[in-house]
Amino acid sequence: MPISIRRLLICIFVLLPSVVLADFHFDAKKKNVISDEDIALAAEITAFLVDYETAYNNQDYLTVKSMWSADGNPIYMAEEVPFPLYGQSRLDGYFNPRPGRKILDGIDNRYSEVRAKYVAPGVAVATYRLDYDIKLVGMPAMHGWDRLMAVFVKEGESWKMSAYTESPMGPATMVRKMIKANPAATDAERADYATTQKTIKMLGQAGVSEGFDAFLEERKDLQPTH
């Protein structure tokens, strides 16, 4: 499908509803009202992401970086990197970690569920979902998804990205969702799934901070205030 038509269809889809269902507070029946301004903004950010997705999936990192703010001070927090990346050199290094060597056989990013709000004139924050399939050179293909938040700034007539963070769910929750999406077909797979869940639980419990028992004891009579 031509990019222009795809952008138009996505933007129309975003603009149509004035009320959406949001799966927040574990109740998908709660209605989350979105203002007309936020709907229009989400459509603009969605159009940006259509082009960003195309460039990223073509490994056209020159175009990807051109869609970032020209202030020279980007922030990029990738789930696989243990620290946030600050500055242009860090961003350049992320997109070209081994100069002269191909890292990926292919990556297919798909963005959806865009929500956005203005935080200042010409400055917006957006949340959205990323589903991806990726194959690193010499490794099997993998699938995953992520929740994203990014800051966008208006430069001239165009939105540019200024800061970006990936927010994966906790390991137990993510694995539970993966198991639900890919049910075990054999007894061996069911046993492997059970071992994975048990291991994640064990690691989570093993990592509890020293002194947390005392912390709880000090607050045992505490009642939440609302």
Image (tube, rainbow, N blue to C red):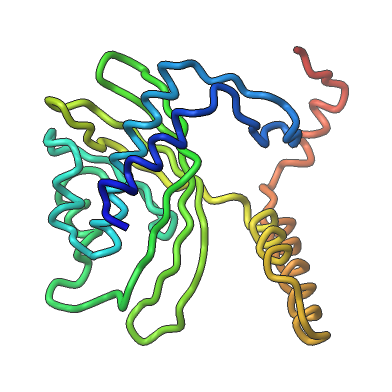
- Relative to residue 152, is residue 180 drawn left or right? right
Q: Is residue 217 above or below residue 62?
A: above
Hey, which residue is sitting farthest right in the picture?
Answer: 221
Query: Does any portion of residue 52 appear in the rendered image?
Result: yes
Q: Is residue 2 above or below residue 114?
A: below
Question: Looking at the rendering, in which quadrant would you find the N terminus?
Answer: bottom left
Q: Is residue 154 above or below residue 189?
A: above
Camera-side residue: 56 or 198? 56
Q: Is residue 7 above or below residue 105?
A: above
Camera-side residue: 9 or 123? 9
Tell me what residue is drawn at x 64 percent, y 33 percent: 22
Tell me what residue is drawn at x 13 percent, y 38 percent: 72
Tell me what residue is drawn at x 44 percent, y 55 percent: 79
Please provide percent x and percent y for residue 111. Answer: 42, 49
Indicate the quadrant where residue 172 lies. bottom right
- Relative to residue 68, is residue 221 drawn left or right? right
Tell me what residue is drawn at x 38 percent, y 23 percent: 40
Indicate the quadrant where residue 39 lies. top left
Please provide percent x and percent y for residue 138. Answer: 36, 87
How many marks overall?
A: 0
Query: Does any portion of residue 215 appear in the rendered image?
Result: no
